[in-house]
């Protein structure tokens, strides 16, 4: 299984040294990091990219560097949250110039397909701060659903912080009947 994935408009690929500077700029942007406790320092950003690349190499899936027309555009992919290694999360973070074009949804659908069809996962989750309505809209667009009973206080966010309360969305492996059905195909059908 190769590490690179392509969608209609995007390349999901391994990380390169050239990604580090635009990634650090994105992670230092207060608007991009609005729903995180704080922007990342250059060292924290570089460490995240290093962990993302290691995850891709170890699992064959993970947080891919995202590319639009040859330009670095953040990341999208699958990861296991440090606070609950039994879960697999689909997530994304894109620079402001890439917002509003459907890139996060397009790449997340491919990540779901990889998770279900190639990694054999039974369920994938996504979570964000209650205030992050843009990410919640992406979660719904890719076919995920929320049960308010699953909402939680994020263990890595300080108690009482405005971002402590999180929503959790889920999607299960699609049923297979008469051939292989993928999460991406089912989500596209719902969008049409």
Image (cartoon, rainbow, N blue to C red):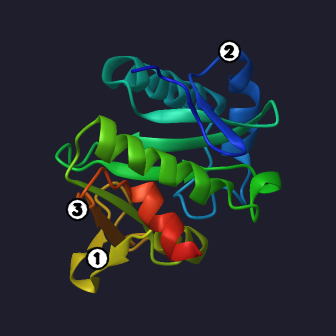
Q: What is the CA distance from the residue labelled 2 to the residue labelled 3?
A: 40 Å
- Nearest the viewer among 115 and 127 is 115
Above-or-below relation of 127 to 119: below
Which residue is at 22% across, 62% downward? 175
What residue did someone put label 1 on?
151
Which residue is at 68% across, 46% downward? 8
What residue did someone put label 3 on?
175
Q: What is the CA distance from the residue labelled 1 to the residue labelled 3?
A: 26 Å
Q: Position of residue 33 (x, y in %)?
A: 63, 56
Question: Helix or strand or loop: what does disc 2 sit on?
Answer: helix
Q: What is the CA distance from the residue labelled 2 to the residue labelled 1?
A: 37 Å
**The C terminus: image quadrant:** bottom right
Question: Helix or strand or loop: what does disc 1 sit on?
Answer: loop
- Nearest the viewer among 177 and 128 is 177
Quadrant of the image occupied by residue 18: top right
What residue did someone put label 2 on?
17
- Circle 2 or circle 3, nearest the eye: 3
Above-or-below relation of 70 to 134: above
Few, some or many residues within 10 Å of mark 3 (<14, 14–19, 20+): few
Residue 113 is at least partly visible in this image: yes
- Name which of mark 1 and mark 3 comes first in the sequence: 1
- Name which of mark 2 and mark 1 comes first in the sequence: 2
- Name which of mark 2 and mark 3 comes first in the sequence: 2
């Amino acid at each position: 299984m190769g590490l690179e994935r392509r969608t209609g408009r995007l390349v999901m690929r391994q990380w390169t040294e050239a990604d580090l500077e635009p990634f650090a700029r994105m992670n230092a942007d207060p608007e991009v990091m609005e729903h995180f406790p704080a922007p990342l320092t250059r060292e924290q950003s570089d460490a995240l990219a290093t962990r993302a690349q290691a995850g891709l190499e170890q699992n064959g899936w993970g947080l891919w560097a995202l590319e639009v027309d040859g330009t670095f555009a953040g990341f999208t992919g699958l990861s296991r949250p440090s606070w609950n290694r039994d879960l697999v999360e689909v997530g994304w973070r894109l620079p402001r110039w890439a917002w509003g074009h459907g890139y996060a949804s397009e790449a997340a659908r491919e990540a779901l397909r990889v998770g279900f069809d190639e990694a054999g996962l039974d369920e994938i989750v996504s979570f964000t701060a209650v205030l992050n309505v843009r990410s919640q809209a992406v979660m719904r667009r890719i076919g995920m659903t929320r049960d308010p009973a699953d909402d939680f206080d994020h263990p890595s966010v300080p108690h009482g912080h405005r971002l402590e309360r999180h929503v959790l969305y889920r999607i299960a492996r699609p049923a297979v009947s008469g051939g292989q059905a993928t999460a991406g195909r089912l989500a596209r059908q719902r969008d049409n």
